[in-house]
Amino acid sequence: MSATLPAAGRTPVRRLAGLLHRRRRLRLSLLLTAPLLWLAVLYLGSLTVLFVSAFWTTNSFTSEVVKVWSTDNFQALLTTSVFRQVILRSIGVALAVTVLCAVIAFPLAFYTARVARPRWRPLLVVAILTPLWASYLVKVYAWRLILSQGGLADWMLKPFGLSGPGFGLPAAVITLTYLWLPYMILPVHTALEQLPASLLDASADLGARPGRTFRSVVLPMVLPSVAAGSIFTFSLSLGDYITVQIVGGKTQLIGNLVYSNIELNLPMAAALGTVPVVVIVLYLLAMRRTGALSSL
């Protein structure tokens, strides 16, 4: 009995299926067309519109957008001290959150991946992911209550003669660190879990102390995962404005300036919006050298 159907019994659907089966490139192109079109039109298209509108200006009398090519907005970002301070402060906050997340995440990830009993490790990972299931605003307002005057932070520090940080830049850094910490713990946990125990045993057999083993064996293998986690913590902190609005007091970051200029000066808001995009692209290029992108 022949394995092929006669020409009369081959429907258009079967002929199309046979064509796609024989031509793998055509099949792959059809599969990628929809997501690539979505990426090009909605994501890259919106970034293009953002970048183009940043070169427009606003009529100071009518507040209407004047679609005339000009670099005044970017000149204002570079020459106005307020804008420079806000940009540098935003980058500093993103870096501080990233460093704190890395410092806190490493011992937690080491315990969940190497110390805890195997049957408890999945439960610990779920516990780490649990805060991500809660609403963003609920978590931020919870930290507002903790850091407020007479709140939990004041109550815990009062026996030591100290008080909580209150609302301001430290409160924003603490809250952002809590929000994005799971994004740092998970890649570090995965890297430590995949770390061969034979390497640690070999280092100990050669007489290396724990500190030397950490510097020479563990850290080089885990560093790409730390860099991968930093991409999330840095980018999410750099573009955040709600946390600073709620617990930051009078602190202003890039996101707050973008939000406040959307209705008053849309081109300036677009110019401010390009700053995080450029900074994140530069950060990704720097992290690419560490192998972080392959660890995502």
Image: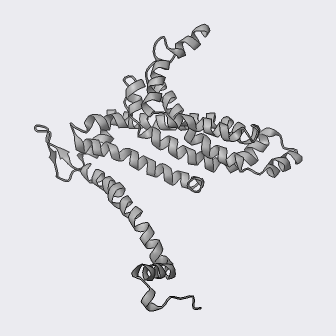
Residue 253 pos. (x, y %): 38, 33
Q: Is residue 185 above or below residue 43?
A: above
Picture residue at 57% right of the left edge, 48% below the top: 228
The quarter of the picture where residue 248 lies is top left
Name, please, the residue furthest toward the left. 61
Residue 48 pos. (x, y %): 31, 56
**Left or right: 195 in relation to 241:** right
The foreground one among 139 and 234 is 139
Picture residue at 84% right of the left edge, 44% below the top: 208
**Left or right: 14 in relation to 72:** right
**Left or right: 82 in relation to 127:** left
Residue 163 in sight here: no
The quarter of the picture where residue 185 lies is top right
Q: Is residue 9 above or below residue 76?
A: below
Picture residue at 50% right of the left edge, 77% below the top: 24
Number of labels in the image equals 0
The foreground one among 205 and 181 is 181
Quadrant occupied by the N terminus: bottom right
Picture residue at 19% right of the left edge, 46% below the top: 57
The foreground one among 286 and 147 is 147
Q: Indicate the colouring scheme.
A: one colour
Residue 115 in sight here: yes
Residue 55 pos. (x, y %): 24, 50
Q: Is residue 23 above or below residue 128?
A: below
